[in-house]
Each structure stands twice: as structure tokens, then as C-alpha cells.
Image (tube, grey):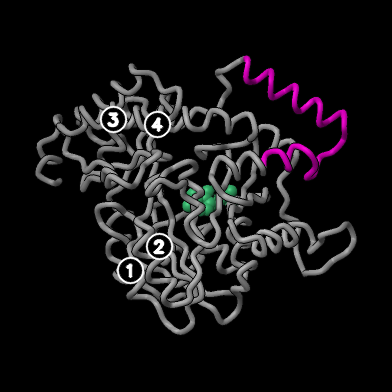
Amino acid sequence: MTAPPPATAVAPAADLPLVRLGHADGAELEALLADLRRIARAGTFTLGEPVEAFQEEFAAYCGATHAIGVSSGTDALALALRALHVGPGDEVILPANSFIATAEAVSAVGAAPRLVDVDPDTHLITAAHVAAALGPKVRCVIPVHLHGSTVDLDPILELTRAEGVAVVEDACQAHGAWYRGRRVGTLGDLGCFSFYPTKNLGGWGDGGAVVTDDGALADRVRMLRSHGERERHHHELVGTTARLDAMQAAVLRVKLRGLDAANDERRALAAALRAPLEQAEVSLPARPFPEADHVYHLFVVRSRARDALRLHLQGAGIATAVHYPKPIHLTEAYAHLGMGAGALPVCEELARRQCTIPLFPGMTPDEVRRVADAVVEAFAAEARLLAGR
Ligand SMILES: *Cc1c(COP(=O)(O)O)cnc(C)c1O
């Protein structure tokens, strides 16, 4: 492995990115542009027919009775919590290694995040973590299907039902993933999705959805996203502006048709990366147990020599990232929780060791080989790294 470049060196731009968002499919692009032209001519930019149609199709896809299109994944989570009347004085359990948005949604409704640790192998929250954090103020648990890997929900649901605690699934990284024959997002009281462009189902901007089988909860989310209205200018609740745009809905309708194929491609790419990487001194993503799933929103490896590995890949023109460099309790934003370093050791250790390497639909076999070769080389070149696994 080459020595790290001096601090002043300008890093070469990675020609193999973490994700490729440009439209390779010309026919799909033309179909999308035709839809947008239709919406522009009709002038129905908020809610309306495209949103209604997308909601129906997304609910059917998930196997949920209701889907409500909203403005982002963060808003989906906050509206789900509000629909459950979670607010000031309440606590919500969530894993500290999630994207900060999961905690922000809890803060947005005035409740307190109760951050917990995760399993060191799966990086997911388990029933044992939930059980240890339950208390009189806990009203809700948010299991996060992180990186596209499904949380073992049944033991958590058994526990929360017995305690009268609600479950809101954060499925923002796991669109279409299965758990015991059902799609994630439909197992808790409500399920929340983001359609941020890089997600497994991504739009051309921000968007999100809440799915649920509960008609009363669906009704509340639907009203809260649009000023507490059931009918225009008839405000029954103090709501907000958090609607899904018609243009995003039109884009998402087209992309939803390709979601299962895209997830299959992600699973196949993951398998192609795994085989050569079994030789390298990195820990690979835990394989899901038979009734669970992984849709590889991100392919995250772990290594004690993480930073050297990243430098080596950077030198080879391959982008990497760390999702996320700090667990939520160690961010400046959540310093007020007063949980210092050492409070959640597994999340802290994962933050030091994990590294996201490229995996995205459209990645070519050559690109997979290039990534795998570069990772293997990074460790072969430097015995020091082998010793430091
Ligand atoms: C992306 C994401 C969110 C937030 O979604 P936005 O649409 O960006 O607001 C929440 N939770 C997780 C786990 C995410 O990955």
C-alpha cells in the first residue's frame, strides 16, 4: 500500500462513484419527461391524481392498506409520531447508529430520543436492546432497517405489544425488503420511507411516504401533512406543510415498477462482491437469517485499518464513504443528551471501523472486479494491515 499523500495533496476525483444517479435509460427518461409535461400543462402541482395513483400503487406494492405521500423521510417519521400522539414528556427508543434524521423526527415532535446500542455483527437493534431501554416514559420504538438489512421484528413486536408501546419502522433504507413473507414498513403500527434520490426508490428531489393498515392513523397523517385539512380550508388539527409533490409522485410511479428488479440487481452485486472479498481482511455485511432480507442500500464493510483502506481506494479512483462517522449521541446536535464517549460502545466501534464501498444498480462486472481487486490489494500490500484486522 502506498504511503498516505501529504495533507496538501489534492485527492484525485473518483471515477467510480458510490452511486450513479444520472439516467442511463433513455426510454425511461422520455416517459418521465412526458409525465412532467402533462402535469405542467394541467397545473396540478400538489397532491392530485399522480399522488393519489402513487399512494395506491405504493400501498399495494408494500401490502399495506394505506400509503400517504409526504415531503421527506424525516417528515414521514415526525408525522407518524404525531399521529400516535407522541410528544413532550414521551421517550422514543431508536438505535444510535442510524442517520440523524431518525432522532430529529423525535425531537421535532417534542419527545426525547432514547438512543440504544446495536448488535455488533448485524449493526441492527434487537429485542434485548429494546427491553433494556423500556421505561415508564417510553411510548414508541423506531427499529431502523439500516443499510437495507431487515431488523428481526417479531421479538421486538412481542415485547412492545405486551408493554403497550407503539412501533414505527424506519424503512428509509429498505424499500421492498422482506421479513417473514411481508414487506418491511407493514409490520409495525406505521412504516416510514424516504424517496431522497440515492435511496433504493428515489425521486428527483425530496419525498417520503407513511404506510399503515390502521385507517384512523392514516387519516391523521393525511390531515397533518396538509394543515389539518380533510376538506380545503377546514382545519381540524394543527398540521403542517409536508405533502408529496405531484411531479415527484409521477417520477416515483415509473421508478416503482423497476424497484424489485433494482433490488435483485443490488443483491446480485452484493453476492459478486462477497466472493472475492472473503479473501480480504475485512468483515463483510452480516448475511440475513433465512426469514429476513438485505436489499443493500449500502454495502458496508468493517476493518480496523478502515482509514488506510479508504486511502488506498481513493488512490485507485474508487469513492468510499462512512455512514456515519459519528453515532447520534456523539454529534454536536445531541450533546445535550449528555451521553459521552463510551455510552454506546458498539455504535462507537462501528463508526470507527465501517466503510461504505460502491454498490449501485447499473454497476458493471468490470467495476465490481475493480472494487474487489482494490480492496484485496489494499490488504495484500501491507502486512501491517493484516496484523491489524
Ligand atoms: C434517508 C433517511 C431518513 C430521512 O429521509 P429524508 O428523506 O432525507 O428526510 C431517515 N432515516 C434513515 C435511516 C434514512 O436513511
Q: Disc 2 marks which residue?
A: 95
The prevailing secondary structure element of the residues shown in magenta is helix
Mark 2 residue CB less than 8 A from any atom of ligand 1: no
Which residue type does callout 3 highlight?
Ala
- Marked residue nearer the N-terminal end (3 or 2): 2
Dot 2 alpha-carbon crowd within 10 angstroms: few under 14, some 14 to 19, many 20 or more? many
Farthest residue, direction right: 233
Q: Which of pointers 3 and 2 indicates the residue nearer the eye? A: 3
Is 335 displayed left or right of 348 in the figure?
right
Determine if residue 316 is in view.
yes
Q: Secondary structure at mark 1?
A: helix
Is 70 displayed left or right of 180 in the figure?
right
How far apart are the alpha carbons under marks 1 and 4? 29 Å
How far apart are the alpha carbons under marks 2 and 4? 25 Å
How far apart are the alpha carbons under marks 3 and 2? 27 Å
Determine if residue 147 is in view.
no
How far apart are the alpha carbons under marks 4 and 3? 9 Å
- Marked residue nearer the N-terminal end (1 or 4): 1
Rendered image: mark on residue 271: 3
Verify CB contact (< 8 Å) between mark 2 and mark 1.
yes
Q: Secondary structure at mark 3?
A: helix
Picture quadrant of residue 90: bottom right
- Marked residue nearer the N-terminal end (1 or 3): 1
- Marked residue nearer the N-terminal end (2 or 4): 2
- Marked residue nearer the N-terminal end (2 or 1): 2
Q: Disc 1 marks which residue?
A: 129
Which residue type does callout 1 highlight?
His
Is 248 displayed left or right of 181 in the figure?
right
